[in-house]
């Protein structure tokens, strides 16, 4: 299975972007999917995650109320709607998926750059 992100780009502070993560196979087999980001010189940060069996997605405190993660299994795609973007949201955003079926493994996309100008 391959994950391919799209939707990154340059946006002014206060603007919005929607990232997409398309899987080459069915996302129904994934027990969890989410988005990480990494800014230059900083550690990778889990931004949002959505897991099967959980009623609500989880978000980093820094993005709560501004970002929304969603998953469309019919389209084998996950999304990250990012509103009210701030310069500190600038980073490479990568999607991941976890399949717990033996042997359990993670899948990662190649990343997409998001740059927020002030």
Image (cartoon, rainbow, N blue to C red):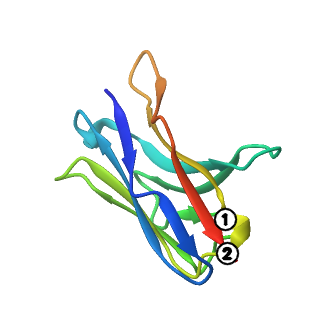
Please state if 113 lies on the left or on the right of 8 as rendered. right
Closer to the camera, 97 or 29? 97
Disc 2 + disc 1, Cβ < 8 Å: yes
Q: Is residue 61 visible?
A: no
Q: Nearer the viewer, residue 88 or 54?
A: 88
* Identity of the residue drawn at 34% across and 29% down: 2
Q: Nearer the viewer, residue 26 or 39?
A: 39
Secondary structure at numbered mark 1: helix
Residue matched to label 1: 89
Does residue 82 appear left or right of residue 36 in this picture? left
Q: Which mark is residue 35?
A: none
| As drawn, 106 above or below 111 | above
Residue 47, position in %: x, y? 62, 57
Residue 37 shows in this picture: yes
- Name the mark on residue 86: 2
Q: Residues within 10 Å of mark 2 (few under 14, many from 20)?
A: some
Image side of residue 13 versus residue 42, left or right: left
- Residue at disc 2, secondary structure: loop
Query: In the displayed structure, would residue 66 be above or below residue 8?
Result: below
The residue at the point 52 percent across, 79 percent down is: 83
User: Disc count in the image?
Assistant: 2
Dot 1 crowding, Cα within 10 Å, few <14, some 14–19, many 20+: many
* Residue closest to the eye, 110 or 72: 110
Quadrant in the picture for the C terminus: bottom right
Image quarter (top left, top right, bottom left or bottom right) of the N terminus: top left
User: What percent of the width, then of the height, locates residue 15?
Assistant: 52, 80
């Amino acid at each position: 299975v391959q994950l391919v992100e799209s939707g990154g780009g340059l946006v002014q502070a206060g603007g919005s972007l929607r990232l997409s993560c398309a899987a080459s196979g069915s996302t129904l087999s994934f027990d969890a999917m989410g988005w990480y980001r990494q800014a230059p010189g900083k550690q990778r940060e889990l931004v949002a995650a959505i897991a099967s069996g959980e009623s609500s997605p989880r978000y980093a405190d820094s993005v709560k109320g501004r970002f929304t993660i969603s998953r469309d299994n019919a389209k084998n795609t996950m999304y990250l709607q990012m509103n009210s973007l701030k310069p500190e949201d600038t980073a490479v955003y990568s999607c991941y998926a976890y399949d717990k079926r033996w042997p359990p493994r993670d899948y990662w996309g190649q990343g997409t750059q998001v740059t927020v100008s002030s």
